[in-house]
Amino acid sequence: MEKRQLGKTGLMVSPLSFGASSLGGVFHDIDEGRAIEAVFTAIEGGMNLIDVSPYYGHYKAETVLGKALRQIPRDKYILSTKVGRYGKDGVNTWDYSGRRAQESVGESMERLGVEHIDLIHVHDIEFQASLPGGLQKVAEETLPALVELKERGLVSHVGITDLQIDNLRWVIDHTPEGMVETVLNFCHYCLCDEALADHLDYFDQHGIGLINASPLSMGLLSSRGAPAWHPAPKELADACRRATEHCAQKGYPIEKLAMQYAVSNPRIPTTLFSSANPDNVKRNLAYVEEPIDWQLVREVQDIIGPAMRLTWGNT
């Protein structure tokens, strides 16, 4: 698989990368052995970036991923995890303090079985926006605490993640140039939403590496359909359902088209997808190696129409 440069980090990443959220049983129960095999399959297929978080499965995803990583040479993967969003006993918690961020990195390394993290992200900063201190706390406390770990050699690069692109830009604009090296944004560069494309020049100007995620828009672009909890407006969900039916009539699964489209823009270095099933990993690897049907892309986006500019809030 080809490699693309991730901003100014010096890291070369595969266009399709492995998101380990599914290893936490976020969406349904998993077979741990199959989940570990899914990680092996991703690495063997040429994916070299693995992204996880202590929040996924409330520490389970990191624990399961760690069992896989202990069997993979360290130079075969680039590892990304996060701080700020957690959970215990099924209850979500948030703590963006510098002290907790540094503690969290150490705890993650222990679960993952590594002595170094390549990318550390402040997770879903939109939640801190509504907490005391707002996004200013991310800029003035969380990120400097992570930069301190970078200076100590425990992490290599520091970034932020969020659904809301405006939040990402606010933090970048309110921190020293180069402090934020990467951003992870989801559901905004896919068949049904291209909002991220409007900001590519901005991120390029700041030398920031982009990580795109959720090419199926959390299930909107799938034959199974979006889960009941999906926060998308009804107009968008209905449009995606019509687009899915159109692709089925053409004998071209919308999942295939969506995966191909998400990795098609060379200005977006990599796109994360998640699965605890090695067969799904193989299928998606095969999808992105095939040429995309651009005529079908146009047809799908015509069906979705103005709904492509609809969005939603916290997840």
Image (cartoon, rainbow, N blue to C red):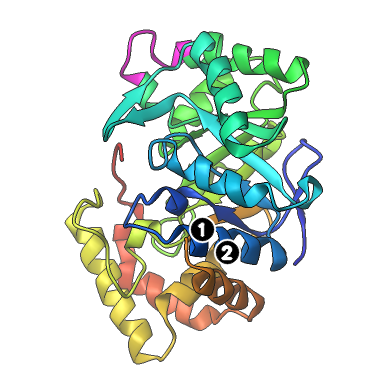
The mark that comes first in sequence, 1 or 2, is 2
Image point (29%, 38%), residue name:
313
Mark 1 surroundings: few (<14), some (14-19) or many (≥20) residues within 10 A: many
In which quadrant of the rendered image does the N terminus lie? Answer: bottom right
- Identified by mark 1, the residue type is Phe
Span of residues in magenta: 129-137
SS of the residue under disc 1 = strand
Q: Mark 2 points at which residue?
A: 37
SS of the residue under disc 2 = helix
Q: Residue 285 vs residue 233: left or right?
A: right
Image point (71%, 23%), residue name:
178
Which of the pair 261/70 is nearer the observer? 70
Nearer the observer: mark 1 or 2; the answer is 2
Q: Does the magenta stretch include residue 49?
A: no
Q: Does the magenta stretch include residue 136?
A: yes
Image point (77%, 15%), residue name:
151
Q: Name the residue under label 1.
A: 273
Mark 2 surroundings: few (<14), some (14-19) or many (≥20) residues within 10 A: some
Tell me residue 41's x, y (percent). 63, 66
Q: In this view, does 45 lie above or below 90?
A: below
